[in-house]
Image (tube, helix red, strand yellow):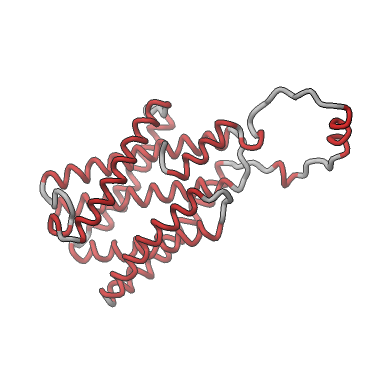
Amino acid sequence: MSNPIFDRVDREAQRGYAGFGQQERTPDLSARQLQDMYAAPSVTPVHERRVTLDDVMMKSLLLFGIVVGVGAVSWFAAAAAPATGMALWMGGMFGTLILGLVIAFKKVISVPLIVGYAVLEGLFVGAISQFFNAQWEGVVPTAVLATLCVFGAMFAGWKAGFIKVTDKFRRMMGMALIGYAIFALINLVAAFMGVGGGWGFGGSGMLGIGISLFATGLAAFTLALDFDSIDNAVRSGMPEKYSWLLAHGLVVTVIWLYIEMLRLLARLRD
């Protein structure tokens, strides 16, 4: 298990989506069934289109571009009017939570919903980044650089085989992610109630820093799961439309890693 997006892709890839990537034994067919199959129209190039790594990369860059572009607008809006920034922060955060669940469990892949999620995420990221930068100047570019470095290191480690994604690894990560998701929701409520000076449990002390380190590490290792899921989808020959879902899942993890980096650095500076 990684995030719900890649869980769905992994399940489809393992059983062979619509027969893609698998050779199954041809069942015994009657003469009538054989005649119907012979008379059916031939498969067109459109039907044969399979997802490729380039597809996922291009969709990921597009979604990241939307997040960055909308985030820049949200950043300047928050800088000009803090009240507007808080509205963008809250609207983007709760909007992505709701829309993310819809995308994860919706049976049909919806490109407009995925693009809409990127827009909402941009609103959230821009507003929260401006807030953190106003409180701890210089923390945002440091968090961005740290996120890029961790992304590159995790990809290199996974590609070189130093990080092996096994079934046991997935189960362990799945339990950790579920546990942290529950904790994060409780911690969010606690933070709004002023616990830990607005940080939630642990505040900006050693306990709080330890929690941020754990969350950052969890987000980093989730990237390895994402890379492996993308590789499985490409190798199993899943339809090209899944490139949108794969790109969306990768963007979700990277933004989560950036937010955790932001919180960790701010706690260290606080």
Residue sitting at x 27%, y 65%: 130
Q: Position of residue 234 (x, y in %)?
A: 57, 37
Residue sitting at x 33%, y 74%: 77
- In screen coordinates, is 150 left or right of 15? left
Farthest residue to the bottom: give it: 81
Q: Position of residue 11 (x, y in %)?
A: 52, 35
Q: Looking at the image, which is closer to me, 198 or 225?
A: 198
- In the displayed structure, 139 sits above or below 238; it is below
Farthest residue to the left: give it: 205
Give the position of the N terminus as an image quadrant: top left
Question: How many discs appear?
Answer: 0
Residue sitting at x 31%, y 74%: 84
Residue sitting at x 27%, y 75%: 83
Q: Position of residue 253 (x, y in %)?
A: 39, 47
- In screen coordinates, is 71 left or right of 141? right
Q: Looking at the image, which is closer to me, 18 or 147?
A: 18
Q: Position of residue 24 (x, y in %)?
A: 68, 25
